[in-house]
Image (cartoon, rainbow, N blue to C red):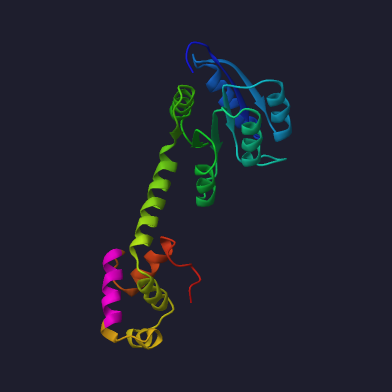
Amino acid sequence: MTGTKANILLVDDHSLILQGIRHVISQMSEIDKVYTASSGTEALSLINRQPFNLYVLDVELPDTNGFDLIEKIQQKYPDARILINTMHEEIWILKRLTKSPIHGAILKSADIHELTLAIQTILKGGNYLCKRFKSILNRLQAEEQLKEQLTLREMEVLQAIAKGYNTREIADLLHVSGNTIESHRKSLMSKLEAKNAVDLVLKAIHLGIIPLDCK
């Protein structure tokens, strides 16, 4: 967006946060008017009257969730630019956000500079992800790459180790030699940079390669 100042819609059910963000955004030179809504219903009422240059949404509202609201905004205004402002950093939230037609996401704990930078970036046509979300995404990508490096047999050996089986028991279970199991064990220790079997299992659980209740 260039030339004209922007109209922004803020949607959040926490009054203090809503007014605080409004105060910050209202002082930005790029902004003309800032509209607010504390529910999905109130937001849709405003959206049905006019489009906005930017929608700043929470993903958790009293009468709907931000993902449904995103969908409704996109249906009415396919070119809508959306910034998610949330307190949630759970992995499932972030994964869903990356699959949503949004242009940015920041945490409510982000500082004023990051909030204004996100808004400026999106209004100029770019995308913005806060430092914390970038860090989580980078970790998830590294984990996925690591999972892809493990062979099916290594996964079977890893799961058996997590269940407390020793080398001979795993060899009998998988109908291979003890030397073969030791070879897989060494490969697993190297790939996960583990010091011992306990460390191996703990790292595998932390990375989401095997479930916490693997017994």
Asked where in the image residue 61 lies, by quadrant, the reply is: top right
- In the image, residue 174 above or below residue 4: below
Q: Position of residue 154 (x, y in %)?
A: 35, 72
Residue 34 lies in the magenta stretch:
no
Q: Is residue 132 left or right of residue 47?
A: left
- In the image, residue 24 above or below residue 163: above
Q: Position of residue 38 (x, y in %)?
A: 69, 31
The boundaries of the magenta stretch are 180-191
Q: Is residue 33 left or right of residue 41?
A: left
Asked where in the image residue 199 lies, by quadrant, the reply is: bottom left
**Closer to us: 108 or 80:** 80
Instruction: Give me the residue at 65% from left, 42% from top.
Output: 65
Q: Main secondary structure of the magenta part?
A: helix
Instruction: Give me the residue at 54% from left, 45% from top.
Output: 88
The answer to whether one can see residue 77 in this image is yes
**Closer to us: 7 or 22:** 7
Q: Position of residue 24 (x, y in %)?
A: 53, 22
**Closer to us: 19 or 170:** 170
- In the image, residue 214 above or below residue 31: below
Q: Is residue 192 left or right of residue 28?
A: left
Asked where in the image residue 70 lies, by quadrant, the reply is: top right
Q: Position of residue 50 (x, y in %)?
A: 67, 20
The answer to whether one can see residue 193 in this image is no
Instruction: Give me the residue at 37% from left, 88% from top.
Output: 172
Number of callouts: 0
Which residue lies most toward the top here? Answer: 3
